[in-house]
Image: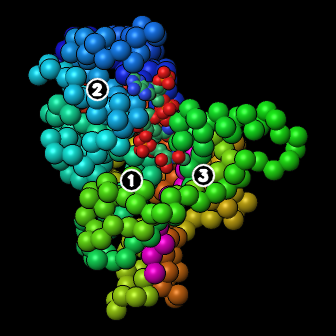
Amino acid sequence: MIAKPKIFIDGESGTTGLHIYSRLNQRDDIELVSIEASKRRDATERAKLINAVDVVILCLPDDAAREAVSLVSSTTVKILDASSAHRTANNWVYGFPELNPGQREKIASAQFVSNPGCYPTGFLACIRPLIAKGILKSNFPITVNAVSGYSGGGKNLIKQYHTFHEQEAGGESLYPYGIYGLQFGHKHVKEMHYYSELASPPLFVPAVGDFERGMLVQIPLPLGILDNPPSGEVIHQAIVNYYQSEKFVQVAPYQDSTLLRDGIFLDAMSTTGYAYAMNGTNTVQVFVFANDTTKEALLVARLDNLGKGASGAAIQNLNIMLGFPEELGLL
Ligand SMILES: NC(=O)C1=CN([C@@H]2O[C@H](COP(=O)(O)OP(=O)(O)OC[C@H]3O[C@@H](n4cnc5c(N)ncnc54)[C@H](OP(=O)(O)O)[C@@H]3O)[C@@H](O)[C@H]2O)C=CC1
Ligand SMILES: CC(=O)N[C@@H](CCC(=O)OP(=O)(O)O)C(=O)O
């Protein structure tokens, strides 16, 4: 293990970069190296830093992340990319330690690690155990509906919402709740398909709501299309067993209405109480709701898009890549 590893966050002033910076800045077991503000987009200066540190965390748009990787000449520097540029690329390891047995060992020994997308984190946390354990066959038709806080859209979308909030005089919000990606083929579908090991890509409809952070990812399961559908309890137990040793995936008790706000709502956005519990954490919660008579089930993941969906996951991966305890700075 390197005594005091040097870390450079390329994109330190963006939404994800800032969150990672503020978490790492409190630690004295690593050294954070920053680029001069005026040289943030200077390839020569970035290349110097990239090749002089132990780990680079890329918090950049996809094209800039690809450019940063093209600047790597050191064979020892480790790269952790928060963008979606390399999530299914050859020679890159997918940074979702809980995905499959052996995944964290692959992360630990990799030079190039790609942080998962926020929506795929919720999706894979729900669906991967059911496919891996044969509870659902890989040809089951899967749809995903999800809603994210607006910070998922980065600095530009945050600014649009904040500007609107400042000007608003009790009127309607900028997009209170809007579905998008209606041409389909959202950039996250590829990694959802690849790592779930489903036969076909899921049909994915994301949405953004007027709340800063947090997300719900929903997967409805029309079990009536099967000759012998699994019961809700079987589905729930399979997911519980899959994550029994995991700290950052929490499977909620089956059908427990006390987890719902007012016994009714599973809420991504309230600022108090249980619903808010995932924001600021690195935990993804998984819920299973089912009706064995109507043969319907719903899997839901709730997470902080900036936590387990981005910066929390990045810290977890960084810890694994550097041989630190995985939960350092996260609990
Ligand atoms: N927000 C979220 O919930 C999540 C984001 N991500 C991913 O993380 C990455 C960063 O997203 P996010 O933080 O939201 O984005 P932001 O728009 O908030 O920040 C992007 C950062 O990249 C910098 N940047 C842009 N272009 C270049 C360039 N050519 N060279 C150097 N720096 C550049 C910007 O610098 P400047 O400040 O100078 O503009 C800014 O610091 C994206 O790939 C995103 O998809 C992943 C999971 C969740
Ligand atoms: C609300 C919103 O706009 N969300 C972003 C996803 C944010 C994210 O996860 O970024 P990565 O693609 O790097 O994973 C989107 O749909 O493109």
Left or right: 262 with respect to 155? right
Left or right: 262 with respect to 229? right
* Res 68 label: 2
Give the magenta part as a residue range. 213-222
* Residue topped by disc 1: 188
Where 193 sits versus 87, above or below?
below
Query: Mark 3: is the Cβ under 8 angstroms from ligand 2?
Result: yes
* Residue topped by disc 3: 208
Q: Quadrant of residue 272?
A: top right
Q: Are marks 2 and 3 in contact (CB under 8 Å)?
A: no
Q: Earlier in the sequence, mark 1 or mark 3?
A: 1
Which tag is nearer the camera, tag 2 or tag 3? 2
Q: Quadrant of the C terminus?
A: top left
Where 69 sits versus 130, above or below?
above
Q: Is residue 303 visible?
A: yes
Picture coordinates of residue 10 (x, y %)? 37, 22
Query: Mark 2: is the Cβ under 8 angstroms from ligand 1?
Result: yes
Provide the secondary structure element on which disc 3 rests. strand
Q: Earlier in the sequence, mark 2 or mark 1?
A: 2
Query: Mark 1: is the Cβ under 8 angstroms from ligand 2?
Result: yes
Going 32% across and 57% down the picture, which residue do you hit?
Answer: 190
